[in-house]
Image (spheres, grey):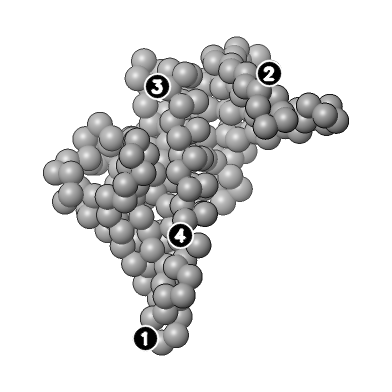
Amino acid sequence: MIAIDGKTLRGARRADGGQVHLLSALDTSTGIVLAQVTVAAKSNEIPAFAPLLDAVEQVLGSLHGLIFVADALHTQTGHAGEIAKRGAHLLIPVKANQPTLFAQLKTLPWAQIPVGRQTRDRGHGRAETRTVKAVTVNTPGGIRFPQQAVRITRTRTITSSGKTSRETADLTISLPPADAHPADLQEWIRREWLIENLCTTSEM
């Protein structure tokens, strides 16, 4: 699985004095950066997505069968098409920057969808329960290929105080259920979160 992540480099400046922003592709199994592209001045990460895929493809020879994961900025129809035409797959969060798809996922009957995977962990003074639900959906006007909608719920309880908090994330993946079981989805999403936290602490 390849995580795409953008970071502004502290202390690095362009000739015009602007900060340098890189879009990187990381192998989540090793944490190794496979490729990086510089985001153009007065632009953003979105136009840099396809050039980054080109760079990764040059390094690896092919993207066929790889799973790419990125943050919600890259929940774009064009990105989905770029991934699909190279034979790869996309696991992506869905937020309000894609209002049609966001509304479709929010209104799914999640209460009636059975839990596909649940894990419990204790440590660092808290207990955490993570659940995964997934359902195959068609989303006209959304990302244009067959996909699963995924809901991850993390419930944390502070042992000393008993205070509980809950975090829910909705995502979509282009792989069908036979190739992306709930246990797989949980592992892939957890790995991407770990990589994002690593990049945040090491590059900023």
Q: Does label 4 or label 3 sit earlier along the sequence?
A: 3
Of the two numbered discs 3 and 2 in the rendering, the one whose residue sits closer to the viewer = 3
Of the two numbered discs 3 and 1 in the rendering, the one whose residue sits closer to the viewer = 1
Residue 30's place in the image compared with 177, above or below, is below
- Residue 114 is tagged as none
Q: Secondary structure at mark 1?
A: loop
Q: How many marks?
A: 4
Amino acid type, residue under disc 4 in the picture: Glu
Residue that badge 4 annotates: 203
Amino acid type, residue under disc 1 in the picture: Ala
Q: Residue furthest right?
A: 161
Q: Are marks 3 and 1 in contact (CB under 8 Å)?
A: no
Q: Give the distance between the C-alpha atoms of the residues marked 3 and 2, in whole angstroms.
A: 21 Å
* Local crowd size for mark 3, using a 10 Å CA cut-off: few (<14), some (14–19), many (≥20): some
Q: Residue furthest bottom?
A: 16
Residue that badge 2 annotates: 111
The residue drawn where x is 27% and y is 58% is 51
Locate residue 116 relative to residue 29 in the image: left or right: right
Residue 135's place in the image compared with 85, above or below, is above
Of the two numbered discs 4 and 2 in the rendering, the one whose residue sits closer to the viewer = 4
Residue that badge 3 annotates: 180
Q: Secondary structure at mark 3?
A: loop
Locate residue 202 relative to residue 88 in the image: left or right: right
The residue drawn where x is 21% and y is 35% is 64
Q: Give the distance between the C-alpha atoms of the residues marked 4 and 3, in whole angstroms.
A: 31 Å
Q: Give the distance between the C-alpha atoms of the residues marked 1 and 4, in whole angstroms.
A: 21 Å
